[in-house]
Image (cartoon, rainbow, N blue to C red):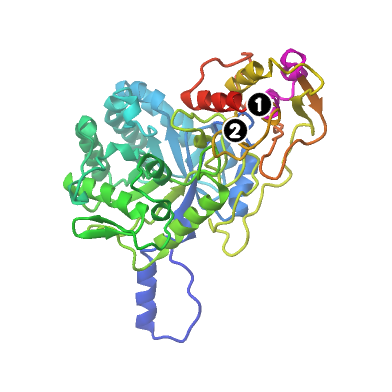
Amino acid sequence: MPSQNLKSTPIPRFISLLLVASLLYLPNAEGIGVNWGTAASHPLPPHKVVELLKSNGIAKVKLSDADPLILQSLSGSNIRVTVGIPNSMLRGLNSSLKAAESWVHDNLTRFVSDGASRVLVDYVAVGEEPFLQTYGDQFHPFLVGAATNIQAALFKAKLSERVKVVTPCSFDAFTSDSNPLSKSQFRPDVNKTMLELVTFLNRHQSPFFVTVSPFQSYIKNKNLSLDFALFRQTPHAKNSTRRTYKNLFDLSYNTIVSSLSNSGFPQMEIVIGQIGWPTDGSPNATSSLAEEFTKGLINHLHSKSAKPSNHQDLPTEIYILSLLDEDKRNISTGNFERHWGVFTFDGQAKYQVDLGQGSKNLANAKDVQYLSSKWCVVNNNKDLSNASALAWEACAGADCTALSLGGSCFNLSWPGNISYAFNSYYQQRDQNSESCDFGGLGLITSVDPSDDACRFSIGLRTSSALSVLHRSSVFCWIISPAITMVLWLLTERL
């Protein structure tokens, strides 16, 4: 990893060398990347996202798949890329080397060939947290076989020296209730597969990608304080036998390091594939706290005194979750899942943090193409006795997570919350006039109903090839528990 630039100062040469050597172990801006997800009804066009990455000096990006439009937009950008293979493909790749060779040929070979326009792919991420406890054994039994076949396909394509195979692992793949933490290990039901995976990674000198989930850990564990999660200086540190932890990140990281060490891999390189703090959809999910967490994390990683483990220094490569909000992201674990972005869905910075741009403020996306300045709201001149049921239907097919308890739009009074539900549905359907009917209760207006806290969004003009919205259905009746809670709160406040 390139070292940070040192100011020119008249110091002895040997001291300069020592300083440079020490900086090699600290993550600079080039060690900080972002996750670029595409679970959005109206995604920002790929070329705009690449402009956003470059204008903010973001040098690394992790993708959830191998979308050819996105890879094409990254050509010649000099941005280092991790390409993803979704869990749904693991079974097929496990059973067929030919399928793996076809995947490498179709998704890598044509993009990474030498030349000024090539894509700088560092990793292929086989699977996306396949060890998640909620998945059971749906994916992980096929993981190592799929990774092995992809590795063989890379070798055949003469890419194995350039591209490493990795697997992003979820934090719940480890036992985190061990005391002391030095006894941490892999979860018993996935221990065999995890051992096979880390053996495979070690053999091919690939790093161990893992998610660290401080926000989820905080909301699930009443014994963890917000100060502890946000790197705040506090005397209330957490003890584990002879070690004292001053923040949740170090506690989590040492769980990972100890698990790997206890499995026989104490020096395996660790990459934090996902870490972040959401900005909406839950209590304590705000932009100000996300800024505090992200700045605290980066400052901590740059700290010379920070060393949470006896075995390893802090990681030198991390990927922030995430670059942009995604309004179609799965919310089974919480409504905050759609609000991880440092930037809003349309590329506007929510807060300020150094992702590579230095002391300058984050640059927003430029020349974004929106739909018309129109919103769908409740017609107050109509009988609104049926408005609640219609809002339920709207939220079932749109994104109402900002109406959640603690969300930015939770304090909207009636019928403003109904209008928010109507508008979300209307914008996701490209402002089709029929999508603002709602039994005659909807009204299209050119007056922005947003207030200081709650934004009524306008959709983006997006090619149909980029949108994952299922326009064929009028309403989506598969309602997650998280959305059910939003709808219940909305009804209770009518």
Are dots 2 and 1 in contact, CB under 8 Å? yes
Going by the numbered disc 1, the residue's amino acid type is: Ala
Q: Which residue is pictured at 68% across the width and 15% down the height?
A: 386
- State the residue position of label 2: 403
Q: Is residue 375 left or right of residue 59?
A: right
SS assignment at label 1: helix
SS assignment at label 2: helix
Which quarter of the rendered picture does the N terminus lie within?
bottom left
Q: Percent x, y for residue 337?
A: 50, 35
Q: Is residue 67 magenta?
A: no
Which quarter of the rendered picture does the C terminus lie within?
top right
| Res 176 → quadrant | top left
Residue 471 is at least partly visible in this image? no
Q: Is residue 91 left or right of residue 267?
A: right
Looking at this view, is 278 or 228 the one in front? 228
In this rendering, the answer to whether 163 lies above or below 425 is below
In this rendering, the answer to whether 205 lies above or below 149 is below
Looking at this view, is 59 or 193 the one in front? 193
Q: Which residues are magenta?
A: 419-441
Q: Is residue 425 magenta?
A: yes
Q: Which residue is pictured at 55% across the width and 57% down the height?
A: 353
Prevailing secondary structure class for the magenta stretch in the rendered image: helix
Q: Residues within 10 Å of mark 2 (few under 14, many from 20)?
A: many
Q: Residues within 10 Å of mark 1 (few under 14, many from 20)?
A: many
Looking at this view, is 228 or 1 the one in front? 228
Q: Percent x, y for residue 259?
A: 22, 45
Q: Which residue is pictured at 38% across the width and 83% down the height?
A: 13
- State the residue position of label 1: 421
CA–CA distance in space, label 2 to label 1: 9 Å
Q: Is residue 473 left or right of residue 63?
A: right
Looking at this view, is 190 or 9 the one in front? 190
In this rendering, the answer to whether 450 lies above or below 295 is above
